[in-house]
């Protein structure tokens, strides 16, 4: 099967801090001094295959290389080595053909401040060769869909962040591209607009379009994406459907328990309970239990504790989540 | 080559220019016309300058207006659009080679510079008459020089706009544009530098010298001026050189 998006051994090394096009400087990347210039390795061999008609998520913390990947795939960042294709077109050899097939929503709104909302859409359509009638019809439909009709004929300079973001997405959809790139689309959106955005993304996907979005939001990755790649320090550390990825975490459930002061023997007793994969003491009163089941373990834990005369005072169960997965692979939280 | 996209980009710039037409006119014409009024009217009228200075001044004023307009029209939007907001991004993503996005800017600037140059003549004529003596022997040659001057100004705008940051705009005008204008044989013919032989040679690296002298040669040939074929060659060389440098800078700036 032909991929909608494909990359092979994609590498990118910046000799200076990455410019705005790549979403700014990746924080805490492996900086190595070679001669006078500090090299920043933003991507370290990325292989991606996104099937047509998929919503694909690139999940990772800030500075992981998400925006650089999107930048290369959208002709805005030149790769140091490796190759990238949109459908059958090599992004760097067939730039114009590749650009014709993509729509891009950058991390920061980059609207044309000299134009009104409607003009932004109609001129964008004109760049892509739409007829004047098509342009005005699509612009009207999109403005309506994104709830921007009442501000359609105002300059976008005065728009709020959320409105600019909606406007950027509307613009990217204006020429009905086969592949839509959304770099952190829901950052800064209120929950209501975020839901609207998710609905619109799903709707667009149902027309058979491919969508690649980057996010560091677990919920977004989990509910919206059909396929995910987890990226950290410029490398893909895990790939699969959200369910597959969650199932790959050993144990899956994390039970955070608190007791009064407890004897060390309790850890051993908890460790032998069925389904428990790992037990870790946390401070004087806490115990973290990684296990294959959650709530059903509680009575057994209570009994084990009671047998030693210890009382369970608090319990928190977290279900298998991408957050736990990220923690498992990198030892760091996504939010760090 | 995707001409549809190219003309759509041009249409966008025309639309924006139309929207800003009043400030654009003031910005383009106020300073040169004040200059024409003071030097051509007040100084000549009061006898401090000879009457012939009116005609000598006009080509220089035309050159200044064109260069200012061309540089401003290309450099300022580029500087702004390549800033933090990356406004230019939607045009870089248009289905056209990115060099053509830059060439479109040059063409838009060139058109504005030609319009500015051709409008200065009747406006100055209103202020300066009577006594203004223009002799356009060959309209074709005059138009060629005008086009080459407009080309050098908008290509210069591209090169400057892609090399200068927002915080250095003031510096660009005081360090580049102002010396260029004063050493550009705009208010005096190049032959007036005969008594300053070293300066006369140094100013030859200033493209505005060829712009002023070329317009002088085609508008008021009764005054001393540089040999026209040499002016045409020099302007062509500057056009090509600045376009080449500008495109390289643009590509470096557009792709990281």
Image: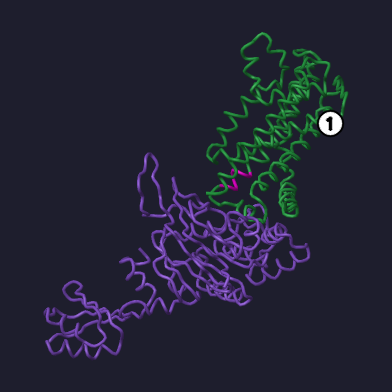
- Seen as rendered, the residue at the extreme top is B195
Check residue A98 for magenta coloring: no
Colour seen for chain A: purple
Compared with residue B148, is residue B81 higher up or lower down, i.e. above or below? below
For the record, the magenta segment spans: B77-82
Report the side of A225 relative to A315 (left or right). right
Quarter holding the N terminus of chain A is bottom right
Q: Colour of chain B?
A: green
Q: Is residue B246 left or right of residue A279?
A: right
Percent across and percent down for residue A248 are 36, 77
Image coordinates for residue A307, horizontal then vertical, percent? 13, 90
* Residue lying at 55% horizontally and 74% vertically, measured from the top left: A54
Q: Is residue B88 left or right of residue A299?
A: right
Quadrant in the rendering for residue A265: bottom left
Reading the image, the residue beneath label 1 is B122
Q: Chain of mark 1?
A: B
Q: Quadrant of residue A193?
A: bottom right
């Amino acid at each position: 099967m032909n991929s909608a998006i494909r990359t092979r051994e994609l590498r990118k090394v910046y000799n200076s801090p990455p410019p705005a096009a790549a979403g700014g400087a990746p924080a805490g990347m492996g900086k190595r001094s070679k001669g006078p210039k500090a090299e920043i390795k933003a991507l370290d061999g990325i292989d991606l295959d996104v099937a047509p008609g998929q919503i694909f998520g690139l999940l990772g913390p800030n500075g992981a290389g998400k925006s650089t990947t999107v930048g290369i795939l959208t002709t805005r960042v030149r790769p140091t080595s490796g190759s990238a294709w949109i459908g059958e077109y090599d992004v760097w050899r067939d730039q114009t053909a590749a650009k014709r097939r993509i729509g891009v929503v950058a991390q920061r709104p980059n609207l044309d401040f000299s134009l009104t909302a409607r003009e932004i859409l109609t001129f964008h359509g004109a760049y892509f060769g739409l007829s004047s009638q098509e342009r005005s019809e699509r612009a009207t439909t999109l403005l309506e869909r994104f709830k921007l009709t009442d501000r359609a004929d105002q300059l976008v300079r005065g728009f709020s962040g959320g409105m600019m973001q909606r406007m950027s997405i509307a613009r990217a959809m204006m020429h009905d591209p086969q592949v839509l790139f959304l770099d952190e689309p829901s950052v800064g959106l209120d929950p209501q607009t975020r839901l609207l955005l998710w609905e619109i993304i799903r709707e667009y996907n149902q027309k058979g379009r491919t969508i690649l979005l980057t996010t560091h939001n677990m919920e977004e990755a989990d509910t919206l994406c059909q396929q995910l790649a987890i990226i950290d320090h410029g490398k893909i550390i895990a790939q699969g459907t959200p369910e597959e990825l969650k199932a790959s975490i050993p144990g899956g459930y994390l039970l955070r328990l608190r007791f009064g002061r407890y004897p060390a023997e309790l850890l051993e007793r908890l460790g032998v309970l069925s389904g428990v994969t790992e037990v870790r003491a946390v401070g004087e009163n806490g115990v973290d239990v990684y296990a294959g089941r959650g709530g059903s373990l509680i009575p057994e834990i209570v009994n084990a504790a009671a047998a030693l005369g210890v009382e369970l005072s608090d319990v928190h169960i977290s279900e298998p989540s991408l957050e736990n997965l990220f923690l498992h692979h990198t030892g760091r939280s996504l939010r760090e | 080559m995707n001409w549809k996209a190219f003309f759509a980009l041009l249409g966008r710039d025309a639309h924006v220019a139309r929207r800003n037409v009043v400030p654009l006119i003031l910005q383009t014409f106020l300073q040169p016309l004040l200059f024409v009024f003071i030097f051509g009217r007040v100084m000549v009228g009061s006898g401090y300058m000879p009457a012939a200075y009116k005609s000598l001044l006009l080509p220089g004023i035309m050159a200044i207006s064109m260069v200012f307009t061309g540089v401003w029209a290309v450099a300022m939007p580029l500087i702004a659009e390549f800033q933090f907001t990356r406004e230019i991004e939607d045009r870089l993503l248009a289905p056209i080679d990115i060099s053509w996005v830059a060439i479109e800017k040059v063409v838009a600037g060139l058109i504005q510079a030609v319009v500015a140059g051709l409008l200065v003549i009747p406006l100055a004529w209103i202020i300066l008459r009577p006594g203004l003596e223009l002799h356009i022997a060959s309209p074709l040659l005059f138009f060629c020089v005008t086009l080459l001057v407009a080309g050098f100004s908008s290509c210069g705008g591209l090169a400057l706009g892609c090399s200068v940051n927002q915080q250095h705009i003031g510096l660009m005008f005081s360090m580049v544009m102002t010396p260029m204008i004063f050493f550009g044989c705009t208010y005096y013919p190049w032959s007036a530098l005969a008594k300053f032989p070293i300066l006369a040679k140094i100013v030859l690296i200033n493209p505005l010298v060829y712009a002023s002298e070329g317009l002088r040669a085609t508008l008021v040939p009764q005054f001393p001026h540089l040999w026209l074929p040499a002016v045409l060659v020099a302007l062509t060389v500057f056009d090509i050189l600045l376009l080449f440098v500008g495109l390289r800078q643009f590509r470096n700036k557009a792709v990281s």
